[in-house]
Image: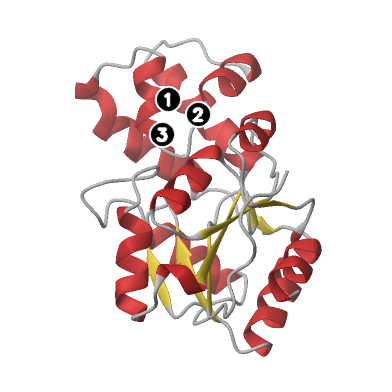
């Protein structure tokens, strides 16, 4: 499925983090199991597939977790996540290096908290890779609202019409489209592949190597 043509010129490429550059799906699932067990909420693979969203408050709400427990759930999730580490997805480093080598400005727009994302970037040797980062909780609105991308572009002084966003969820596509940015969808490890395809990104790719090819074409 394809939509708009690639912008010309294309000057900036913004990325999602979890599921797009970093293989964090299985780790996230294990964290959810631990969190919901604490509150006596049943959670299994089926629930993960049915309720997954990069806005985890949607998951909390769908599973009936009372909002008064959300701060504790967040703390538990972060504690469990910190006991393990996520790896880069195949081709991630090469994709970033190739795009940067072509003169494109790289940015990150993610639902993940800055402390965790920066810790992972340092461990993976990616510190300083992105000219701008907008992380979860740093804007009044979260994905799929366009504000996180709009803030990133404002900080870069970059027009939306000369920018692209690469993400693995329908919320990524919705956010980027609403911001007027060229959308590249890439299936990741989270259970939302069919929803991603239905969201209709401008370009759908199979992996990060193809993403670099299509972006630079």
How many residues crowd around disc 1 within 10 Å: few (fewer than 14), some, or many (20 or more)? some
Alpha carbon distance from label 1 to label 2: 10 Å
Q: Quadrant of residue 15?
A: bottom right
Whether pointer 3 and pointer 1 mark residues with C-beta atoms closer than 8 Å, the reply is yes
Alpha carbon distance from label 2 to label 3: 10 Å
**Residue ID for mark 3:** 56
Front-most of residues 195 and 10 = 10
Q: Secondary structure at mark 2?
A: helix
Q: Position of residue 213 (x, y in %)?
A: 78, 70
Alpha carbon distance from label 3 to label 1: 5 Å
Mark earlier in primary sequence (1, 2): 2
**Residue ID for mark 1:** 59
**Residue ID for mark 2:** 32
Whether pointer 2 and pointer 3 mark residues with C-beta atoms closer than 8 Å, the reply is no
Left or right: 75 with respect to 126? left
Is 197 located above or below residue 179 in the figure?
A: above
Q: Position of residue 71 (x, y in %)?
A: 25, 34
């Amino acid at each position: 499925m394809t939509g708009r043509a690639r912008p010309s010129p294309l000057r900036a490429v913004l990325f999602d983090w979890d599921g797009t550059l970093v293989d964090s799906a299985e780790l996230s699932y294990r964290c959810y199991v631990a969190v919901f067990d604490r509150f006596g909420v049943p959670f299994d693979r089926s629930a993960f597939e049915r309720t997954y969203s990069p806005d985890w408050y949607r998951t909390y709400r769908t599973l009936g977790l009372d909002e008064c427990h959300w701060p504790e759930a967040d703390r538990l999730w972060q504690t469990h996540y910190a006991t393990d580490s996520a790896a880069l997805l195949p081709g991630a480093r090469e994709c970033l290096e190739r795009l940067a080598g072509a003169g494109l400005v790289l940015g990150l727009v993610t639902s993940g908290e800055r402390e965790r994302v920066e810790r992972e970037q340092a461990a993976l040797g990616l510190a300083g890779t992105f000219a701008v980062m907008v992380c979860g909780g740093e804007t009044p609105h979260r994905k799929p609202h366009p504000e996180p991308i709009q803030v990133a572009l404002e900080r870069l002084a970059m027009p939306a019409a000369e920018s692209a966003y690469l993400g693995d969820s329908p919320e990524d596509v919705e956010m980027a489209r609403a911001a007027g940015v060229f959308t590249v969808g890439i299936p990741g490890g989270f259970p939302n592949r069919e929803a991603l395809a239905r969201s209709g990104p401008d370009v759908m790719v199979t992996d990060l190597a193809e993403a670099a090819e299509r972006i630079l074409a």
